[in-house]
Image (cartoon, coloured by chain):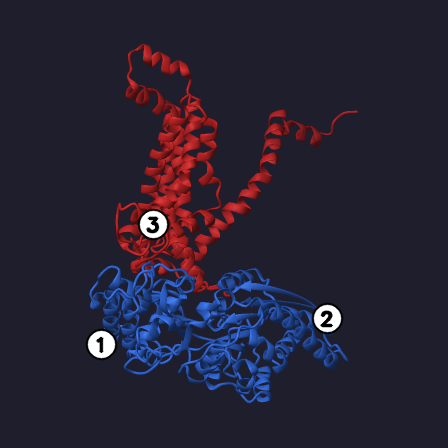
């Protein structure tokens, strides 16, 4: 039996290479659909809604940049922008410092270090609302743990309203956020430290490098990629986190701790989801810049 | 206005009574309705608003369930934390999963009714009103959604509002036997008993609903949020300046508890229940909590109307309403259930357990409002003498939006936390308020 011309043409088109490619695409399609459905569509929809005057129960009309214009005139929005950036940067730096220090310490051959590692992970393992409500109790002016320690030990005889006054409100939120978030940095950096070959340290020591030089020339390059990824993830999480500010201060006093997610929540309370979406979308450029910067640095490292 | 302390009612007995009454009420109505059972075989979902009384919540749930059983309707009762009603209803509207009927606040009803989320209930509203001596004027006026929805979409079932709670043990020891009549007297009394760990004046200045009590203070000083048209914001005024002067003076005297600018919704409850405040403004839920958990504090608590300012007392009533969803497949049954829940037989028992004032004239004669219980007596007084929501301002969607953005508490925070001068704080509030009003 001989092949018909049509069948022959089909066989010529469907070469082994093409078949492999098609099979690969077929395998990717479900994931692609999942990403479109769970990431791209909600993301695109949020951007679209931010350009409408949509309220709950209505489709809304396209209003262009009106929502963003309204937000730009709001003092609360201005406070949310600066507070969010400040919170992300300061908590990031502090978590890096604490996480790196503890990781370097626990990476040494110390007795009971396994137990110590587990202990350090406790804040991360604790549900966020439990952690931040506990901090709220600690900060309470009357009967709060911090004031009790300060007054009972005579370190500071007066009660401090940690969350209720501008100079201490944001530092208090930062302290609680750092406490909850440093274990992620610690465990990530520890994992990176353990992947650095011991031989590099031996070689550096033989070459006469001191501790600082060993850290700067061997450790830092070895953990650089992990720190960058951790910084990116941690920044996104902190910028999007709602519960730390909401449970501690609800954005007050006088917008001293107002951040994007809390402001978006207030927008939702009035059913004006167009405005609420605009608040969330306003945050995207900042995170996008961070994302591009980190990705660029990592790519440059890879190319070296 | 002042009330004396009642006897404590045994809690277990009240739970038993509530369940028994639920069964009895549903049974009697079931006998009447069950003869033809027009809704037999249908399903009905009801979202009830959780309140600070376990017994009242149970009675509502049991009554609905038993009404369903008596009428052949398969009911599902979901009790919702009222702090989450906005989010839950918003999500349900967007996803098309609204319950057939629900409890909600007037603010949410007003906003949602603009989107035709609920069906008009005028006929039912009139029938219930006529049967029980008519609606209280303030309730009738406040819940009229005709302008935004073309009809009444809410059936009121209870009224709440802020009462002034005070510690009589502390105040009488300081020589104050009666409730303060003005805001100045309030500060004077608060200052007299202000000694750590007790703060005199436990009013919230934070971004929560309790912080909006400051709007009532501002209005009692003659200040207004907007003009008569309800379109132009008029926060910046000499009257507002007078209010801010009062506030700053009280703040400088140190009568406010530390942390009150960042309290959550339970902040004032907590300071009062822990004995750290001599005065708070509260709906009465604190009194219920004290009755159950701290009888001594309950004994030493008296309730009165909010103090007056130079232009009188502004004490807004907050009606709670029930509504029927426009997307419900079982609207007739939902309306029948709402009518059943408005019957005196049910509400007689419900009011004894709940922290609501009456909404119908005929309900004033209920046992709950006979004066034995100071909280209910205070709520009855509030309904009879209180002011409509927003009064003297126009209560519209822009006003509700401004309240939800806590513009007045934020202005107060600018003065006491940031030390801004009054003009600067008023300018910011005026601009922020007008930006909100311009959206409507």
Dot 3 falls on which chain? A
Q: What residue appears at the point 47 percent right and 49 percent down from the top-left corner? A: A130
Which chain: red?
A: A
Is there one chain holding both mark 3 and mark 2? no
Residue ranking furthest to the front? B173
Closer to the camera, A241 or A11? A241
Identify the chain of the residue marked 1, using the numbered disc in the image.
B
Q: Nearer the viewer, mark 2 or mark 1?
A: 2
Q: Could you say which is closer to the camera, residue A192 or residue B32?
A: B32
Looking at the rendering, in which quadrant would you find the N terminus of chain B?
bottom left
A133 and B1: which is toward the camera: B1
Checking the image for residue A148, the label placed there is: 3
Q: Are marks 3 and 2 in contact (CB under 8 Å)?
A: no
Above or below A198: residue B126: below
Q: Is residue B231 left or right of residue A274?
A: left
As drawn, A283 above or below A230: below
Q: Nearer the viewer, residue B331 or B281?
A: B281
Crowding around mark 2 (Cα neighbors within 10 Å: few <14, some 14 to 19, many 20+) is: some
């Amino acid at each position: 039996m001989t092949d018909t011309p049509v069948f022959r043409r089909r066989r010529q088109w469907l070469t082994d290479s093409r078949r492999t490619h098609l099979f690969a695409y077929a395998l990717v399609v479900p994931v692609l659909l999942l990403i479109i459905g769970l990431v791209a569509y909600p993301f695109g929809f949020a951007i679209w809604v931010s350009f409408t005057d949509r309220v709950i129960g209505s489709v809304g009309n396209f209003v262009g940049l009106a929502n963003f214009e309204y937000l730009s005139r709001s003092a609360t929005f201005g406070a949310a922008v600066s507070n969010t950036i400040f919170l992300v940067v300061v908590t990031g730096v502090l978590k890096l410092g604490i996480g790196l220090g503890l990781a370097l310490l626990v990476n040494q051959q110390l007795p009971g270090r396994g137990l110590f590692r587990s202990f350090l992970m406790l804040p991360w393992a604790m549900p966020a609302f439990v952690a931040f409500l506990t901090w709220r109790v600690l900060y309470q002016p009357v009967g709060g743990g911090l004031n009790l320690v300060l007054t009972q030990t005579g370190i500071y005889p007066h009660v401090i309203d940690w969350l209720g006054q501008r100079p201490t409100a944001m530092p208090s939120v930062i302290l609680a956020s750092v406490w909850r978030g440093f274990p992620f940095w610690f465990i990530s950096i520890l994992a990176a430290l353990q992947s650095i070959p011991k031989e590099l340290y031996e070689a550096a020591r033989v070459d006469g490098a001191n501790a600082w030089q060993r850290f700067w020339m061997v450790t830092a390059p070895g953990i650089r990629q992990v720190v960058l990824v951790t910084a990116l993830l941690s920044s996104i999480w902190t910028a999007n986190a709602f519960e730390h500010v909401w449970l501690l201060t609800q954005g007050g006093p006088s917008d001293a701790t107002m951040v994007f997610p809390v402001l978006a929540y207030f927008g939702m309370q009035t059913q004006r989801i167009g405005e609420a979406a605009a608040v969330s979308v306003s945050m995207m450029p900042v995170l996008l810049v961070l994302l591009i910067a980190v990705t660029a640095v990592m790519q440059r490292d890879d190319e070296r | 206005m002042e009330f004396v302390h009642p006897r404590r009612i045994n809690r277990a007995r009240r739970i038993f009574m509530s369940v028994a009454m639920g069964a009895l009420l549903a049974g009697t109505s079931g006998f009447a309705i069950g003869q033809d059972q027009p809704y037999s075989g249908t399903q009905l979902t009801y979202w009830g608003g959780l309140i600070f009384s376990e017994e009242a919540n149970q009675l509502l749930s049991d009554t609905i369930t038993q009404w369903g059983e008596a009428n052949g309707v398969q009911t599902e009762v979901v009790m919702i934390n009222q702090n989450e009603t906005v989010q839950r209803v918003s999500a349900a509207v967007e996803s098309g999963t609204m319950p057939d009927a629900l409890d909600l606040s007037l603010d949410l009803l007003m906003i949602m009714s603009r989107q035709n989320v609920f069906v008009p209930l005028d006929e039912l509203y009139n029938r219930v009103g006529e049967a029980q001596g008519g609606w209280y004027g303030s309730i009738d006026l406040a819940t009229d959604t005709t302008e935004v929805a073309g009809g009444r979409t809410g059936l009121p079932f209870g009224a709440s509002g802020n009462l002034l709670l005070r510690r009589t043990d502390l105040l009488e020891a300081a020589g104050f036997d009666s409730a303060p009549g003005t805001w100045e007297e309030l500060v004077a009394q608060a200052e007299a008993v202000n000694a750590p760990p007790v703060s005199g004046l436990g009013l919230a200045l934070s971004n929560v609903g309790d912080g909006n009590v400051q709007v009532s203070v501002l209005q009692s000083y003659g200040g207004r949020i907007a003009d008569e048209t309800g379109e132009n914001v008029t926060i910046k005024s000499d009257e507002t300046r007078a209010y801010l002067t009062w506030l700053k003076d009280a703040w400088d005297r140190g009568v406010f508890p530390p942390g009150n600018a960042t309290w959550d919704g339970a902040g004032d409850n907590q300071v009062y229940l822990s004995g750290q405040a001599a005065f708070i403004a509260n709906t009465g839920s604190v009194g219920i909590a004290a009755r159950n958990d701290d009888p001594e504090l309950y004994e030493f608590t008296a309730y009165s109307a909010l103090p007056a300012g130079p232009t009188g007392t502004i004490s807004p009533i907050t009606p709670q309403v029930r509504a029927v969803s426009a997307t419900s497949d079982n609207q007739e049954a939902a309306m029948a259930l709402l009518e059943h829940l408005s019957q005196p037989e049910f509400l007689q028992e419900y009011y004894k357990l709940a922290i609501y004032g009456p909404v119908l004239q005929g309900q004033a004669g209920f046992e709950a409002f006979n004066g034995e219980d100071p909280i209910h007596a205070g709520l009855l007084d509030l309904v009879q003498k209180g002011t409509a929501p927003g009064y003297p301002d126009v209560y519209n969607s822009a006003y509700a939006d401004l309240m939800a953005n806590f513009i007045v508490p934020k202005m107060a925070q600018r003065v006491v936390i940031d030390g801004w001068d009054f003009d600067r704080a008023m300018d910011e509030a005026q601009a922020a308020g007008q930006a909100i009003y311009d959206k409507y």
